[in-house]
Image (tube, helix red, strand yellow):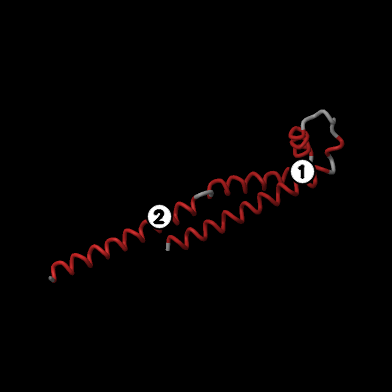
Amino acid sequence: MLAQASFYIQKTHNIEVAMKNWANNEINRLASKKIAQYDKFTPYEIKRFQIIEDDEAIKKLYNVFLESSKRADSLYMLSSQIKFMSQTLLEQQQTKRYNDGNRRNSTAN
């Protein structure tokens, strides 16, 4: 059951990362059309944020980027931790079964 939860969380994380990358690529594509309008001595990041602030469509894409980033960051490593817990519990269960089997065999002799 934990393995299934881990798989679901990893799948959700991958979707969020894909959404984040898509939004970032779209922002860059749309911003590249407008970047020449800004002073060539202005740093790229400042130009980018000015374009985001000035264009409503790009601003919405930026909000998608931020939300996806937050969700992806919160899911990061969670599936790996759940998978590790699942494996640890499985190993404990196998060890317990082995020890129980050895106790039964030793009391039967």
Instruction: Count neighbours of disc 2 (C-alpha within 10 A) and say few if under 14, some if 14 to 19, many if 20 or more.
Output: some
Query: Residue shown at 79%/41% (left/top)?
Result: 55
Where's residue 11, x and y in %? 56, 59
Query: Residue shown at 45%/56% (left/top)?
Result: 83
13 sits left or right of 49 in the view = left
Query: Residue shown at 12%/70% (left/top)?
Result: 109
- Residue where numbered disc 1 is placed: 56
Instruction: Count neighbours of disc 1 (C-alpha within 10 A) and say few if under 14, some if 14 to 19, many if 20 or more.
Output: few
Camera-side residue of 96 and 73: 96
Q: Could you tell me if the residues under marks 2 and 1 are in contact, i.e. CB atoms within 8 Å?
A: no
- Residue where numbered disc 2 is placed: 85
| Up/down of 18 relative to 42, above or below | below
- Work out which residue is located at the far front of the displayed protein and give it: 109
Camera-side residue of 54 and 84: 84
Camera-side residue of 8 and 60: 8
Specify which label sits upstream in the sequence, 2 or 1: 1
| Up/down of 41 relative to 28, above or below | above
- What amino acid is labelled 1 in the image? Glu
Q: Quadrant of the N terminus?
A: bottom left
- Circle 1 sits in a helix, a strand or a loop, which is it? helix
